[in-house]
Amino acid sequence: MRIAIIGAGYVGLVTGACLANLGHQIHVWDTDIEKIATLRAGVCPIHEPGLERWIPQMQYHHIDEAPEFLFDAFYIAVGTPAKLDGTADVSYVASAARWIRMQQIIGRVQIIVIKSTVPPGTASAVRMIVGDDFDVVSNPEFLKEGSAMADFQEPDRVVIGTVEGKAPGSPFWVVVKDIYRGSGIAQCKFLSMTNESAELAKYANNGMLATRISFMNEMSRISNKVGADIDDIKLAVGYDSRIGDRFLNPGPGWGGSCFPKDVSALASMAGAGVGGTICYAAINGNRDQKAYIVRRAMGILGDEPGHVCVWGAAFKPGTDDTRESPALSIMERLRSHGYTVTVHDPVARVNIPGVTQCDDMYEATLGADLIIHITDWPQYRTVDWGKVYMRMTKGQGVVLGKRTVFDTRNVLDPHAVRQFLKLERL
Ligand code: NAD
């Protein structure tokens, strides 16, 4: 089949790559002329394991180029960032819909699949734009950056929202079977519902995950205050089969391109006459956690001007995405308090005035008083702590254990670290 994808970001490229893998012909459109040039040169503009090899298998076009063929389906995968009031900005989705409407032959029913995360009512707004010649399907994407290819190909479930809701009879159901034929997706659970339910389901999913993390981060702050160990609390709670042990890890706060904007959009929906407070609490708790990390770091450093080395800038391992990464706001706050800050990340680049990025994780620790471990990249778990100690003390042999590592993920081996350095955990 011939499939058009609008938006060459994480979701658009991964969707295209996985559909190319199934033998479909994929054409991707984007408004970003530099990104199109990069893709045409066969270079993947993002770090996503397994994606790179599929980049030359797709064709790329700037949005000003009209399609030369008819397409069996159009996937909309453009961004839906937060507006200043916290609600989702769907203007990119609307402009993608207008573009699709302009391209196609009137009188032939075609499929538009909305992959972007959009507020309830967006599919119907798109339908108003494109008219009756299109069947508008909501198919929210649940992939995780860092394992996006695998998540797309073997999802926990596929959510399909149509105007008919639970009675799947639209042309899309015929097409969808062909699109996914022969893949792991075809074997998984398809949940059919109305467009509005499918749209809200994606927000509910992210809202639930973010709230769990905010709750556990609050537990970690309480644990620290009362002398409890959050790792024990996590175990005790996680063994409850009603709760389960996923997404209970405390950390420096959630970030990335999705949770912050989606929870804020959900909070706006809940605030608009529904009387909801939980999403607001999750957002406030997340802000509190980042401030708490900075307070703890400053408490460790004392009044002296100090040098902080931050390990990890991406919002999670496996990606170069630093959007809303807690590492960024923690570094910015430390800089504003006058600390020297160096940072290392295996792939993500940082652009914060006054923060020095090092390509080598040991080099970043040279002369540092404190290391804050923020992103759980695997290489930080297998560190040569003797070498780190020598770098931090510049080989001058200060009192053993004076320099500190603050592990905001509680994953570093305490025994290994404490042979050379002081260790603080959540
Ligand atoms: P992104 O910012 O990486 O990519 C969006 C792309 O759309 C950009 O390249 C941009 O130039 C392009 N674009 C914007 N307007 C356009 C238009 N009118 N025509 C053509 N191209 C246009 O975004 P993303 O991370 O891929 O997310 C896309 C959507 O998918 C969002 O709604 C997001 O919430 C959702 N989503 C993202 C993830 C994720 O992990 N990144 C996971 C699930 C769902």
Image (cartoon, rainbow, N blue to C red):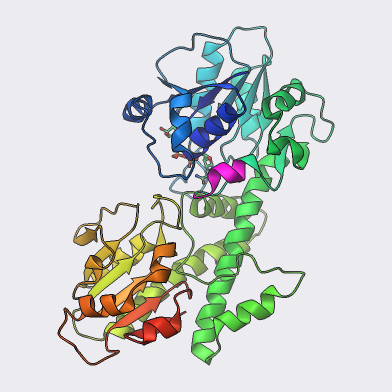
Residue 371 horizontal side relative to residue 100, left or right:
left
**Vertical side of 214 occupied by 268: above or below:** above
Q: Residue at x 16, y 81 (%)?
A: 395
Q: How many marks?
A: 0
Report whether residue 51 is seen. Answer: yes
Query: Foreground: 215 or 252?
Result: 252
**Vertical side of 219 occupied by 283: above or below:** above
Residue 172 is situated, as x and y percent measured from the top left of the image, at 73, 24
The range drawn in magenta is: 146-152
**Vertical side of 88 occupied by 104: above or below:** above
The image quarter containing residue 119 is top right
Residue 224 horizontal side relative to residue 168, left or right:
left
Q: Residue at x 58, y 39 (%)?
A: 118
- Magenta span contains residue 343: no
Q: Residue at x 60, y 69 (%)?
A: 248
Q: Quadrant of the N terminus?
A: top right
Q: Main secondary structure of the magenta part?
A: helix
Residue 334 is situated, as x and y percent measured from the top left of the image, at 27, 70
Residue 337 horizontal side relative to residue 74, left or right:
left
- Magenta span contains residue 151: yes
Residue 153 is situated, as x and y percent measured from the top left of the image, at 63, 40
The image quarter containing residue 372 is bottom left
